[in-house]
């Protein structure tokens, strides 16, 4: 990757299961004057990577196609905190559809996402044919140059599920694995509309061997009604009122960790930093100082004060307040993920 500063450090990927504090970390990093913190791009784009070489025009098309789950949330105007695009006054609306790039990523980089979108729309389609991985690296580098940042950070919610893809795009990246207590994470997932869709799609894959959100030809006959209400052609805001067992979120959390374990375990020690959410909340200055050292940028005192001041505390140990039986079931569903964290040495 060519960089605005030849001495700039390799890009950094902040990854996790989702609902583990990665949005907060991305917002902290975006306050640093040297850091380009690209948020949610790979969560929003429907097909992050296709094989072979593609033109700039085709790459731009890929950046516009929104993940079906997010598309339904937008279409039904279901509030999601991470969606910062001004749907009530921006160029794009739920009726017109919103490009993936515009919905989640550009509003985190600028107060005028439509203007930046227009700039990119005039630039990116002109790029020469290249492997898709190279097009992404060029895109991130272009944003860094455009916004005057020298350190590139990618952070997409729940990106452990695509860590292998991210490492193909950024083969020299340093990886921050942000992790949180399993039951607390699962409980937080249960309160988020996108993870409700994700948990139900996960259960559909388990029962059907395929995901109807990704494969329209999936045979869904015989699907239980609580899952059928989450099919793409049946999903509405009312679907979110259907109770989902907390243990289903725990199994999702565990599976994300298990699937990502080979990629995390295969990284050399100097390219992997494990960051515990509880530690970050308890001592943000120490954790952010270590994060800056790992990422190759200065732990500027002004940035540390501002970033530490944005920590949202009081969100640890929340699953402990659940009824005993529900807490036990949730704990059991998280045992597999906990064992992965122990094998990786990320829990002591």
Image: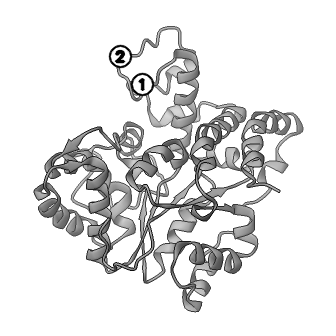
Determine which of the numbered discs, if any, sits on residue 217 in the image: 2
Distance in Å between CA atoms under marks 2 and 1: 15 Å
Q: Position of residue 20 (x, y in %)?
A: 63, 55
Report helix, strand or loop for mark 1: loop
Q: Nearer the viewer, residue 195 or 157?
A: 157
Q: Residue 245 occupies which quadrant of the picture?
A: top right
For the view shown, which residue lies furthest in the top direction?
222
- Residue 108 appears anywhere in the view: yes
Report helix, strand or loop for mark 2: loop
Q: Residue 306 occupies which quadrant of the picture?
A: bottom right
For the view shown, which residue lies furthest in the front direction?
268
- Residue 98 appears anywhere in the view: no
Q: Is residue 202 above or below residue 52?
A: above
Q: Position of residue 232 (x, y in %)?
A: 40, 27
In the image, which is nearer the foreground, mark 2 or mark 1? 2
Report the side of 135 relative to 347 (left or right): left
Residue at 54%, 74% in the rendered image: 28
Determine which of the numbered discs, if any, sits on residue 267 in the image: none
Q: Position of residue 51 (x, y in %)?
A: 29, 38
What crowding class fits label 1: few (fewer than 14 Cα within 10 Å), some (14-19), or many (20 or more)? few
Q: Residue 340 occupies which quadrant of the picture?
A: top right
Q: Position of residue 283 (x, y in %)?
A: 74, 75
Residue that badge 1 annotates: 234
Q: Quadrant of the N terminus?
A: bottom left
For the view shown, which residue lies furthest in the right direction?
324
Residue at 48%, 52% in the rendered image: 80
């Amino acid at each position: 990757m060519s960089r605005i500063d030849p001495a700039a450090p390799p890009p950094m990927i902040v990854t996790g299961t989702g609902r583990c504090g990665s949005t907060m970390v991305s917002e902290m990093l975006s306050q640093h004057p040297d850091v380009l913190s690209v948020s949610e791009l790979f969560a929003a784009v429907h097909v992050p990577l296709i094989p072979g070489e593609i033109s700039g025009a085709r790459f731009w098309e890929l950046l516009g196609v929104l993940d079906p789950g997010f598309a339904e949330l937008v279409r039904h105007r279901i509030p999601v905190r991470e969606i910062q695009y001004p749907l009530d006054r921006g160029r794009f609306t739920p009726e017109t559809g919103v490009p993936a790039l515009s919905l989640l990523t550009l509003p985190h980089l600028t107060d005028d996402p439509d203007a930046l979108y227009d700039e990119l729309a005039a630039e990116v389609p002109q790029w020469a044919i290249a492997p898709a991985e190279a097009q992404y690296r060029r895109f991130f580098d272009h944003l860094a140059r455009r916004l005057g940042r020298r350190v590139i950070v990618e952070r997409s919610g729940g990106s452990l599920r695509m860590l292998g893809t991210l490492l193909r795009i950024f083969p020299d990246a340093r990886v921050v694995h942000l992790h949180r207590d399993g039951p607390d994470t699962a409980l937080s997932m249960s309160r988020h509309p996108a993870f409700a869709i994700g948990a139900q799609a996960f259960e559909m894959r388990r029962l059907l061997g395929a995901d109807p959100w990704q494969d329209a030809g999936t045979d869904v006959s015989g699907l239980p009604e609580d899952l059928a209400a989450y099919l793409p052609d049946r999903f509405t805001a009312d679907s979110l009122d259907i109770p989902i067992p907390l243990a289903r979120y725990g199994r999702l959390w565990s599976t994300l960790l298990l699937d990502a374990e080979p990629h995390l375990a295969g990284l050399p020690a100097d390219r992997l930093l494990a960051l515990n959410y509880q530690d970050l909340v308890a001592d943000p200055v120490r954790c952010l100082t270590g994060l800056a050292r790992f990422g190759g940028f200065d732990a500027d005192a002004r940035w540390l004060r501002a970033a530490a001041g944005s920590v949202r505390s009081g969100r640890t140990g929340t699953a402990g307040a659940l009824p005993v039986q529900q807490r036990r079931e949730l704990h059991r569903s998280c045992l597999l993920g906990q064992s992965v964290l122990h094998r990786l040495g990320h829990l002591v």
